[in-house]
Amino acid sequence: MGHKPARPIYRFSSGRQPFGSVIVSLLILGGTRDGKRLADRLHTFLPDTCPVIYSIAGLVREPELPCTVISGGFAQYGGLSRYVKEQGIRAILDATHPYAARISASAILAARANRIPYWQWQRAAWKPQSHDSWVEFDSWDYLLPKLSRFRSVLLAIGRPPEVVLRYCMNNPAIHFTIRTAAAQPKIQAANIFWVDAIGPFTVAEEHALFTHQAIDTVVCKNSGGDATAAKLEVARESGLPVFMLKRPGLPLADKSFRKMDECERYIASYAAIPGQKNAV
């Protein structure tokens, strides 16, 4: 990986060396644009005695990063808690997708078992604007019967759960455009059009998709951020309803962040304090 670049952003206090020569790592649970950016920047300015390890589920594509990247989950290592213990992980930063509730639950259990901090990067949720027509829902059983009055539905929900795919197959009168970047077997049916794509998407691209597929409603998750927000703008301009899956509840973190610089500054400060390995 070569030499790490200079650290121009944060400077550590004079005489404060993290753990002397002990190597302890920061584990970032990622799979998001924000997670990748945090891993890249933290690798740059954290001391060599606190290397960054970036973990992804491996469902989409592996990022190019200067730090260590592990893919495919932690079962291959005997579970997350064991991996944390054996790798000398000093803290966990959860920068997963807002809907990765299972991963987040496992992360806080591993952190508590190993008496290390569990931190969260929380991407701000989208908020409805004037002229939006949103219907928020928290279960597929609530949503699916409501789709019967539409003719062409955009499903922008990542990997569709089995219950959604069954509904699509059993309702041939409705055309479904399913956009996902996750690798999975594609059910072939005359009323299902698959789009393999990953954001960011522009408003022009979304307009073209909506027009080509004659979309008359959108089903999506409240992912937040800019990468996939254009579909909401197009739906607003076109007066189309949006069915928005509510975010799941998150475990209570030792520290949560919504601003990138605040997150980086806090972790850099933490890494510079001796004796923090088992502090929470």
Image (cartoon, rainbow, N blue to C red):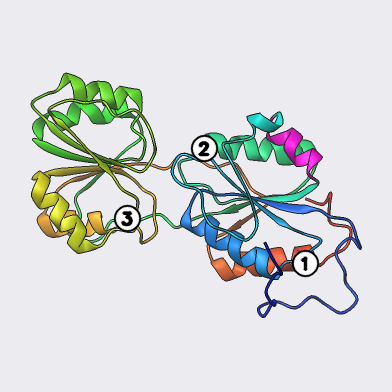
Could you tell me residue 31's position as x and y percent?
A: 51, 48
Which label sits in the foreground, 1 or 3? 1
Which of the 4 quarters of the picture holds residue 273? bottom right
Q: Which residue is at a point 54% across and 62% down the rendered structure image?
A: 37
State the mark number for residue 228: 3
Main SS of the magenta part reads helix
**Sequence-wise first label, 2 or 3:** 2
Whole-number angstrom distance, CA of label 1 to CA of label 2: 31 Å
Label 1 sits on what residue type? Pro
In the image, is residue 166 above or below residue 98? Answer: above
State the mark number for residue 101: 2
Callout 3 secondary element = loop
Whole-number angstrom distance, CA of label 1 to CA of label 3: 34 Å
Residue interval drawn in magenta: 79-87
Could you tell me residue 68's position as x and y percent?
A: 66, 52
Callout 1 secondary element = loop
